[in-house]
Amino acid sequence: MGKRAKPEEIIAKLREVEVRLSQGETTGQAVRAIGVTEQTYYRWRKEYGGLQVGQAKRMKDMEMENRRLRKAISDLTLDNQILKEVLSGKY
């Protein structure tokens, strides 16, 4: 497997495909030229289509922060449940 592409690289590749398509290339040809599969292209287009580089970076940062917060909530919920069990004498 290759390395994971950064949002700014993905957006640049999506723009390159748009240019190639406007020049008459087929989707398959344009996608091969940027070095990804059609499946990857369509997944990227769904996730990043229409975004500017700054927006994509911000979205990824927010997703990471969201993951971190979900983990913190999960840990606190578990701690809360353990304390309730200890207080009720069910340990």
Image (spheres, rainbow, N blue to C red):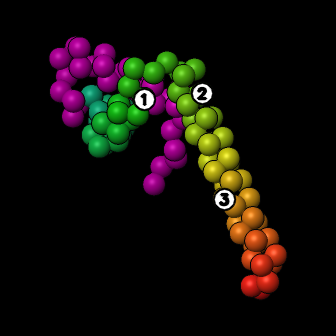
| Segment tinted magenta in the rendering | 1-29
Viewer-side label of 3, 1: 3
**C-alpha gap between disc 3 and disc 1:** 29 Å
Q: Residues within 10 Å of mark 1 (few under 14, many from 20)?
A: some
Looking at the image, can residue 73 be seen? yes
Q: Secondary structure at mark 3?
A: helix
Residue 74's tag is: 3
Query: Which residue type carries mark 1?
Result: Tyr
Quarter of the image for residue 71 reads bottom right
Query: Which residue type carries mark 3?
Result: Ser
Task: Give whichever of 47, 15 is nearer the camera.
Answer: 47
Query: Which residue type carries mark 2?
Result: Arg
Q: Secondary structure at mark 1?
A: helix
Residue at the extreme front:
88
Q: Which residue is mark 2?
A: 58
Please identify the dominant SS of the magenta region. Answer: helix
Looking at the image, can residue 41 be seen? no
Q: Are marks 3 and 2 in contact (CB under 8 Å)?
A: no
Of pointers 2 and 1, the one earlier in the residue sequence: 1
- Vertical order, 81 against 10 (above or below): below
At x 45%, y 25%, the residue is 11
At x 45%, y 54%, the residue is 1
Residue 28, percent from left and from top: 21, 34
Query: Does the stretch in magenta take in 8?
Result: yes
